[in-house]
Amino acid sequence: MKCAIVVFPGSNCDHDCYHILKHVFEIDTTWIWHKDNADLDAFDFVILPGGFSYGDYLRAGAISKFSPVMKAVVHYANKGGRVLGICNGFQILVESGLLPGALMQNRSQKFICKSVFTRVEATDTPFTNQCTAKPVLKIPIAHHDGNYFASDDTLKQMQDNNQVLLRYCDATGNVSDAANPNGSLDSIAGVANAQKNVMGMMPHPERSADPLWPDLDGQLIFKSLIQPR
């Protein structure tokens, strides 16, 4: 199995993802530089990691969508390839049109870095199929622009298609405004496209996946991707 991690100027979680996939799960993992118009067909899945690509100038992810590699990512996704965007990677996927909605400043207008609980809303996807026995995941967030928004029509369409994969919740799985760290519409923490082969999530699974750490819930996201198609 082979995985590609796309690196943009300003990415800072690329090495974290590489470590988990390469050294923890022993997956053949390759970095792809953003200027490369690479052929991604040889990879089983592609990850857009977190960070602050291009310094988040203009708008988080807005400049990265013009990087040459994104043509390859869009082509790969449109052919059914599995793509996971984490935090800034989620923002890039939204800006590139691969995922619906928009990501705005947190309602507090402050950067938030802490562990949160998210409820898995669907376990029949390539990103969540290993979460059947653990519907509530404890995974860290670290973002300033994680406030998810979509129009009423878009939200309804997403709900009808079961595209909302993760919602912020408390430790027992209850969704509430108090458990929503950034003001996201409908407490959304992660979404998929209609075909369920592209996912974006604000929490960082790579930060809760190393066996040396006490929290390992992030492993379930990677284990789901590693499963044979």
Image: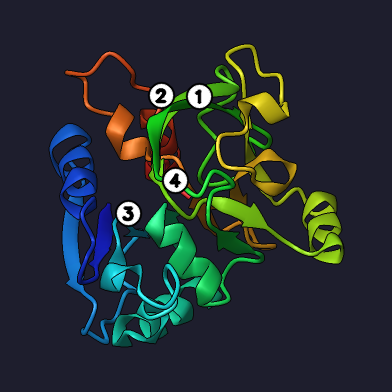
Evaluate if marks 1 and 2 touch, with contact meaning CB atoms under 8 Å apart: yes
Q: Quadrant of residue 208?
A: top left
In 3D space, how far apart are the residues under numbered discs 3 and 1 (Cα atoms)?
19 Å
Residue matched to label 2:
217
Residue matched to label 3:
50
Q: Quadrant of residue 125?
A: top right
Disc ID at residue 137? 1
Residue 198 horizontal side relative to residue 4, left or right = right
Badge nearest the viewer, 3 or 4? 4
Badge nearest the viewer, 3 or 1? 3
Evaluate if marks 3 and 4 touch, with contact meaning CB atoms under 8 Å apart: no
Task: Say which of 154 and 128 sits in front.
Answer: 154
Count of marks placed on residues: 4
Q: Quadrant of residue 46?
A: bottom left
- Residue 19 appearing in the image: yes
Evaluate if marks 3 and 1 touch, with contact meaning CB atoms under 8 Å apart: no
For image coordinates 32% across by 74% down, the residue present is 40
Classify 10 Å Cα crowding around label 3: few (below 14), some (14-19), many (20 and above): many
Amino acid at dot 3? Gly
Disc ID at residue 110? 4
Amino acid at dot 1? Leu
Amino acid at dot 4? Lys
The tag earlier along the polypeptide, 3 or 1, is 3
At mark 1, the secondary structure is: strand
Classify 10 Å Cα crowding around label 4: few (below 14), some (14-19), many (20 and above): few
At mark 2, the secondary structure is: loop
In 3D space, how far apart are the residues under numbered discs 1 and 2 (Cα atoms)?
6 Å
In 3D space, how far apart are the residues under numbered discs 2 and 3 (Cα atoms)?
18 Å
